[in-house]
Amino acid sequence: MVLAGDSAGGNGLAETEEDYGEQEHVIVLLFSLRATCEHSVGTKDDIRCLEKERKALLKFKDELIDEYGQLSSWGNQKDKEECCKWSGVLCDNLTNHIIQLDLNGTSAPLEGNISVWLLEIQHLKHLDLSGNDFNYNRIPQFIGSLNRLQYLDLSNSYFSGEIPHHLGNLSELQFLGLSSYDGMLTSTNLDWLSRLHSLRYLNLGYVSLTMATNWLQTISKLIHLKVFDLSHCHLPTVLPPSPSTFNASNSLYQLDLFGNDLSSFSIFPWFVNFSSGLSYIDLSFNKLQGPIPDAIGNLLSLSYLSLIGNQLEGEIPISLGNLSSLSYLDLSYNQLIGTVPHLALSSSLTQLSLDHNMFNGTVTQSIGSLSKLEYLRLGSNHFEDIINESHFFNLSQLQVLDFSSNPGISFNLSSGWKPPFQLKDVFLSGCKVGPHFPTWLRTQTTLYKLIISNVGILDTFPDWLWGLSSNLYDLNVSHNNFHGVLPDLSSKFSTNFPNIDLSFNNFSGSLPILPPTAVSLVLSSNKFSGPVTNICNKTSCKWFYLDLSNNLLSGQLPDCLVNLPNLKFLKLAHNNFSGKFPLLNYLSSLHLQNNSFTGEILTSLRNCTSLTFIDLSRNKLTGKIPTWVGDTFSSLVFLSLRSNEFFGSIPSNLCHLAHLQVLDFSLNKISGAIPKCLNNLTAMIQEVDYESNESYFITKYMGGFESANVMWKRNEQEYKNTLQLVKLIDLSSNNLVGDIPAEITSLVTLVGLNLSRNNLSGILPANIGQLRSLDFLDLSRNHFSGGIPIGVSQLDQLGVLDLSYNNLSGKIPQNIHVETFGASAFEGNPYLCGLPLNKTCPGDEIAQDPNEEEDKLISGGFYITMVVGFVFGFWGVCGTLVFNNSWRIAFFKLWNSSMDWLFSLYNQPLVSGRGQNRLITRACILGKEKMVFLCWARPSPREQKTCIDKSGDFNYDRKYRGATVKPALILQQDGELSDSGFSVNHTRVLVGSGPETFEKGKSALQNWRHFGLNWAFVDPKTPIQPGVKFCVCVKELFPWLMMPLKVVYVNENRNPKKAVASFSFGSGTLAGHLLAGEERFSITLDENNKVWYEILSFSKPAHFLSIIGYPYVLFSQKHFAHASSLAMSQHLSS
């Protein structure tokens, strides 16, 4: 029998699930028979432990790996015979049976398998195996045979697969914990739960319940349930059970559905009407839409309510202010509007978080009566109020104050005011606090974070603040107008690893001695001057990020920089440093551009093998580019040596830089040929995973991606949060010779290529059309010959093209896109012909034969026939109109309408100034389904308003309204849409990264920056709100075309837990638009911290002009998508 048990136990697994289940049933039967045949008493009077259970535990231990010694007290040795004293074991005082096994492995995890020998512990009531590592094995089915269990916790122990339904046999179970943060457990049906009639605590957090459509009905049957946690379970939205089937627990007091996909409050009646004692509700990070139910005010026992990160709209229900027991309220990251209700009755509140919404108006002074309030977060809203002492009069417990990003908030606190609180964190960025430094902060002696950037302070830095800095971990006073000289800061911060940001002010004088304990020091964009010899000393500093750029600093850098092993990020750009650069060993990112450094600086960096970013542009550096660069800096992403005095050839080892995205050697004295191995620059061939790249990780840690000045389209542009999108090779203004290697056409994600102003020759690569991502191509002022490859016309993303001043010949490839570049892109090539040059190619002229005989058709008989035909034709029509009254009326109606249309098409406005543009008036006479709005001059606001007023309703089917809210793939696969004649257009481009870029992109959409084009615009004052009509003005050839639309929907979603967000709006065409359909513009921050700009539309012709010119319409749509994406990218990088 023992052998059979051992064989079945093994590692607790069978080859198939069916065999696995059958084998366990046999084992359960064997152990049950064995239990009836053996005695239940120990063999020695002084040992309580039952021998059978002791041996079972040792067999259980044999299948575990105890790396941390949690089971070191378990053993066969004589001093370990008493198993009731073993770690984690509890025996019953009367029967000596083991009733509790607590092997929680949070601090010392066990590994291995759960042995079937547990079945020998038949009196076990409490089993805790949470926090261990069972290598993603399945939960053993035999646990369902431990029928005396009242407590079972297997949480976070690396199980996987389907939860065994046998657990439903544990009829005495009161506590069940199966949460799994790795999300590897699933349950497709929860019927087994309904048999656990005694259950009081249930935690299935992170268990995938996507298919468990019966989850709510099952939970409703657990009438004794008190704590209910199904967070992050991907719950399907279901209809609540009918009232007749309700059997819900009246004792439920904690409900946690955090992080699911619930989209409505459909389950709200379930826990409102049948859980009068409910005190804890967490519905955060779902997709809940609409207003907060007013009935929530009926939950009088509610003390904790979190609805953060949903899509809630409307105002906060007044009834919420009646919840006198409410201590925690978090409604942040939604779309709530209105004002904050009176909260005087909510006297128990300790945390009030309403940040990142759209609240407006004033801030209720009833907040000041919340004497228990510790956290007040009202940041990122649209409040407009003057904050005074009344808002804080009774907040004696307040620790966190957040009014940031509320430009309409002003603080008017008297200089002698003494707050009743002691704050730890202060966030006031973007409010109006200045012009003087707030003196009330002098009383706050426990400050941990002080964030008051961009608050309008025009003052000197108060000396008393340094007395408060001993506890400061985060100090940010950037983007103000502080002036004066800073004191020695080396002893001002006693906390470890503080972050200090004093940038964008007017501090002057010499650079102060900096605190050695700081982890981040940002003093850029001030007026510090002089040498930096005292920047550090020989003692080790903890600096990780040091930014002294954009100052007036000069002289040589001290050698003590070599003693900074933690320094990874060094920015000294835009100063006047000179001399040679000291040897460094640990840097990952180096910005030295626009200084006066000399010598061969790259040699000083040879030990910095982790470098990912090097910008040495605009210095006086010299020497050859070392051959070891490509092998030593294997992680390099950005390398700029622009505008120095480097000479020699480009070493082929540079091709080993697989991560390189920006290579700029322009404005040097480099000679030789372009290496043929450029196709080894992998990052320019495929998309880059920015998350796995150390350079981007470092700069994200500091609050954003890398930033640098890059020569782009002949202009120096600063890329702050979008530099990772730039893929550029710039070798211009050197002495390079030879041809362009064909391998360069493999760099299919390259965005910019500048080889101008060299001595390159030969023909252009035939496969240049493969560089489909190119936005900038400059090959001017070289000696290229031969024809322009047809592939140039296939570069449909190209925004700048310059092939001028070469020896190119033949006909320029013809398409509309090439012609947009103008003649200047091709001038200086005497043997080129064709548009856009004003030079026709041989064979394009139509030959005329001067000796061609006169047309014999025109003769006397021709003229006679013409006269007879005219007479009969004229009277055949006019005679009918004279004698047929109804035909005559119809004809002249058509004539008048045609003349009106032709007048609107070709005539100029007859009235200017205050008079209404008659062109628009006349254009509306054809009827609302056929009208078109044209204007010769750029439409004025008055003319746009007339267009909007004259336009009709939506000109496409009601059933398609709002369809663009769907993902592009679904819309593209919608057969009904295509059968109705609509074509779907979709453009999605990466425009940056990080929350700051997303917010800037959202603001750009709200201000119509995506229409910031010379040939297309929308009045930027137009509010983006559902139901608002607006006019898109487009320059088409000679006239301006005005096309009316109406906003159909506006969506904004945020999920701060996953750091994702999106903002979008869709607009539909109105009668008077040349097309019928709908268009969505959106900006999205995804889980990888990338920001995407997207245009999605479906349309079809709605006017005969768009029917006959539909190919041109399709081209215009594509052209607009490209131009709009470029405009957004440039705006977000500016």
Image: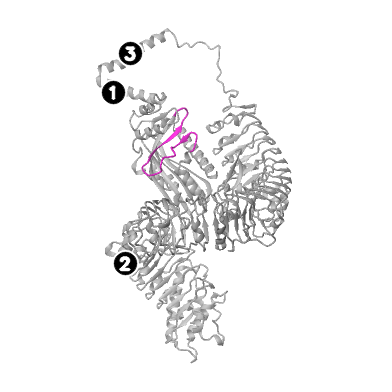
Of 366 and 577, nearer the camera is 366
Contact, mark 3 vs mark 1 (Cβ under 8 Å) = no
Q: Is residue 292 magenta?
A: no
Of marks 3 and 1, which one's residue comes earlier in the chain?
Answer: 3
Colour scheme employed for the rendering of this structure:
one colour
Q: Nearer the viewer, residue 501 or 355?
A: 501
CB under 8 Å between callouts 3 and 2? no
Q: Is residue 302 visible?
A: yes
On the image, which quarter does residue 213 sit in?
bottom left
Kindly indicate whether the residue at mark 1 contacts the one at mark 2 (C-beta within 8 angstroms). Answer: no
Quadrant occupied by the C terminus: top right
Residue annotated with mark 2:
276
Instruction: Answer above or below: position of 1123 versus 250.
Output: above
In the image, is 375 to the left or to the right of 893?
right
1025 part of magenta stretch: yes
Compute the Cα span from label 2 to label 1: 75 Å
Residue at the farthest top position: 860
Residue 672, visible in the rendered structure? no
Q: Name the amino acid, label 3.
A: Phe
Q: Which residues are magenta?
A: 1012-1039
Measured as percent of width and height from the top left, residue 759 is found at 70, 35
In which quadrant of the rendered view does residue 469 lie? bottom right
Rendering coords of residue 935 (x, y %): 42, 28
Of the numbered discs 2 and 1, the one sitting upstream in the chain is: 2
Q: Main secondary structure of the magenta part?
A: loop
Say few, some or many: other residues with alpha carbon within 10 Å of mark 3 (under 14 / 14 to 19 / 20 or more).
Answer: few
Q: Which mark is residue 890?
A: 1
Q: What kind of residue is marked 1?
A: Ala
Secondary structure under the numbered disc 1 in the rendered image: helix
Query: Residue 872: which numbered mark, if any?
Result: 3
Depicted 68 relative to depicted 48: above or below: above
